[in-house]
Image: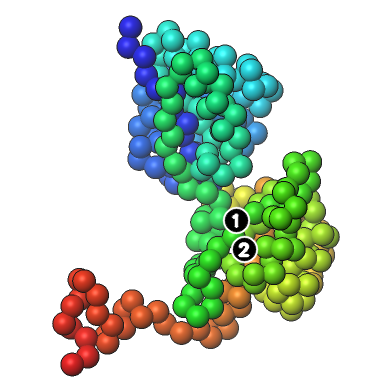
Amino acid sequence: MTQYPVQFVGAGPGDPELITVKGKHALETADLVVYAGSLVPDAVLAWTGKHARLENSAKMDLEAIVDIMAQAHFNGSRVVRLHSGDPSLYGAIAEQLRVLEQKGVACRIIPGVTAAFAAAAALKVEYTLPEVSQSLILTRMQGRTPVPEKENLASLAAHQTSMAVYLSAGLADNLQEVLAANYGPDAPVAVVFRASHKDEKVLWTKAGDLEETMKAAQISRQALVIAGPALEAQKTRDFSASKLYDKTFTHGYRKGHGSK
């Protein structure tokens, strides 16, 4: 009997058309799709074939999730474990892979678009600007899930680079305190609620007004908070162009067409 690898697929941030072509194909050919029901929109499930069996993992524990996938795998079924965004970021896939591997189940991962990039698209911003910011920090505040002390938000914000804060909308007061202290209370901050979904909402505010802005908009979950000097530079249009398209800049594909 042919046994197919269990495929961990990134569903993307919400818009069903933001799944990858490979991820869409995996859903279309799957016999079993185990999906994170509280996070993956029904619209993404529309890519599944009519014969596919759908199982919502929202009420399952790790053992139940792994068992249902392993059993289907050994029965010759094509199994997809569908995660929101990209599976490698806050996806809790490592623990699933560990147990599946212990059971002798082969696995592979198909990446997806994470919400930070859907948020940037909604904001029409670039996280990396020459001489302004060349790094992007993806992180979260400590809540029920602990964060290593060396990765506490204040330590990361001290770098004053572009930052996308996940899973922290319910901690707006603490988030405001850290961002205002490190970027300045008047620094532009963006809040993107349900990036790429039909009910997406984009809010611009200041670091020192973050809590009030989110409270007024009744946003306490499913939102990313974006901060960093690149936001201010793009709002004011005060930044230098990159050398990439400068007529005096040569590279392997434009050699000899610059300055003489």
Q: Nearer the viewer, residue 141 or 150?
A: 150
Give the quadrant of the C terminus.
bottom left
20 versus 32 height, above or below: below
Q: Residue at x 36, y 80 (%)?
A: 243
- Which residue reaches farthest left? 256
- Which residue reaches farthest bottom? 260
- Which residue reaches farthest front? 150
- Residue 204 can be seen in this image: no
Residue annotated with mark 2: 163
Give me the C-alpha separation between circle 2 and circle 1. 6 Å
Rendered location of residue 5, percent (x, y) = 40, 22
Rendered location of residue 172, percent (x, y) = 79, 58
Rendered location of residue 230, percent (x, y) = 56, 74
Q: Residue at x 71, y 74 (%)?
A: 183
Q: Amino acid at mark 1?
A: Leu
Q: Nearer the viewer, residue 127 or 11?
A: 127
Q: Helix, strand or loop at disc 1?
A: strand
- Using the rendered view, name the quadrant where residue 155 is placed: bottom right
Marks 2 and 1 close (CB-CB < 8 Å): yes
Rendered location of residue 72, percent (x, y) = 47, 12
Residue annotated with mark 1: 138
- Residue 140 can be seen in this image: yes
Q: Nearer the viewer, residue 131 or 215?
A: 131
Q: Residue at x 46, y 16 (%)?
A: 104
Asked whether, in this view, residue 242 is left or right of residue 215, the answer is left
Q: Amino acid at mark 2?
A: Met
Q: Residue at x 59, y 67 (%)?
A: 162
